[in-house]
Amino acid sequence: MTTRTTTAALLDSAPITVQAKLTAAWTSFMFLYVYVDVIGFYKPGVLDGIQNGLVWEFEVSAALLTTFLVSVSIPALMVVLSTALPARANRITNLVVATLYIPFTLFNAVGETWEWAAYYGFAIVVEVLLLAAILRWAWSWPRTAARVTP
């Protein structure tokens, strides 16, 4: 008697390291974070405002653009740091940065009209879920038993 195996039975899911999960989450967060702004250029009046030197209510300046660059650079750096830092520093850095980015992400909804609630609301929910996953994975980082050498 022969036994048939299905393709589904042959699938295997190798364990993924915490660093890989964090790197993937920061990469997803970074792309979403940037694309919300890029797609936002299609919002009526946004490009006109930028061409007239205004972003939201702020005058376009070197300080404003530097602030924007820093806010986008941090998630980009977290992609690399989540892979490169030693476990303890990695865990602490991810916990601190993800915690600080939650209120920063929620701030993006300030001043928006109900007309755009679905657009910004969806983006904020997904970004906060990614940050929550980062916090969970960093918080529950597996421990190894200390090695005692005689």
Image: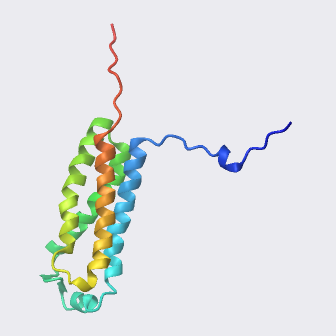
Q: Residue furthest front?
A: 1
Q: Residue furthest right?
A: 1
Viewport quadrant of the C terminus: top left
- Residue positioned 28% across, 89% down in the render: 47
- Front residue of 82/29: it is 29
Residue 110 position by quadrant: bottom left
- Residue positioned 18% across, 87% down in the render: 53
Up the image or down, 79 lies above or below 139; here it is below
- Front residue of 30/2: it is 2
The picture places residue 78, in percent across and down from the top left corner, at: 31, 53
- Residue positioned 36% across, 80% down in the render: 39
Viewport quadrant of the N terminus: top right
The picture places residue 138, in percent across and down from the top left corner, at: 30, 43
The picture places residue 64, in percent across and down from the top left corner, at: 16, 74
The picture places residue 105, in percent across and down from the top left corner, at: 23, 65
Up the image or down, 28 lies above or below 89; here it is below
Q: Is residue 48 visible?
A: yes
Give the left or right position of residue 142, taking residue 92 as reference. right
Residue 104 position by quadrant: bottom left
Q: How is the image coloured?
A: rainbow
Give the left or right position of residue 142, taking residue 5 as reference. left
Up the image or down, 133 lies above or below 18; here it is below
